[in-house]
Amino acid sequence: MDDDFIESVAPAQVMSPCVLVCTLDTETGWCLGCGRTGDEIARWSAVGDAERQAILDRLGTRMATLDARLSGREDKQA
C-alpha cells in the first residue's frame, strides 16, 4: 500500500446530513429526513467539501418548505 497516497488524501470535513429517514417526497424529490435530492445523496461520497457545503446550504430552505407543506397536508386530514 502506498503510504504517500494515504497521507495526501484528507478526510472530508463536511459530514452527511443523513438522519436515516431515506424517503423521497414524490412532489419535490427531496428526502424527508435530510432534504437532499436522490442525485445529491448518490453523489455525496464522490464530491468534495465545497460541493457538500453548497448542498448543505440549500437544505434549510428545502426542509422548511417540506415542513410547511406536510404540516398543511396533515391539518387537512385531521
Image: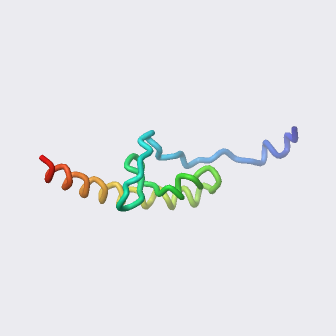
Instruction: Name the residue located 38 percent from the left edge and 61 percent from the top edge.
Output: 28
Q: Position of residue 73 (x, y in %)?
A: 20, 54
**Viewed as shown, does residue 38 lie left or right of 4?**
left
**Viewed as shown, does residue 14 lie left or right of 1?**
left
- Colour scheme employed for the rendering of this structure: rainbow
Q: Position of residue 43 (x, y in %)?
A: 59, 55
Instruction: Name the residue located 37 percent from the left edge and 49 percent from the top edge.
Output: 32
Q: Quadrant of residue 4?
A: top right
Q: Quadrant of residue 29?
A: bottom left
Label count reads 0
Q: Position of residue 56 (x, y in %)?
A: 47, 56
Q: Position of residue 75 (x, y in %)?
A: 14, 51
Q: Which of these two is toward me, 40 or 9? A: 40
- Residue closest to the far left: 78
Instruction: Name the residue located 78 percent from the left edge and 48 percent from the top edge.
Output: 8
Quarter of the picture containing the N terminus is: top right
- Residue closest to the far right: 2
Q: Which of these two is toward me, 1 or 39? A: 39
Q: Which of these two is toward me, 26 or 1? A: 26
Instruction: Name the residue located 37 percent from the left edge and 57 percent from the top edge.
Output: 26
- In this view, 39 is above or below 3: below
Q: Quadrant of residue 60?
A: bottom left
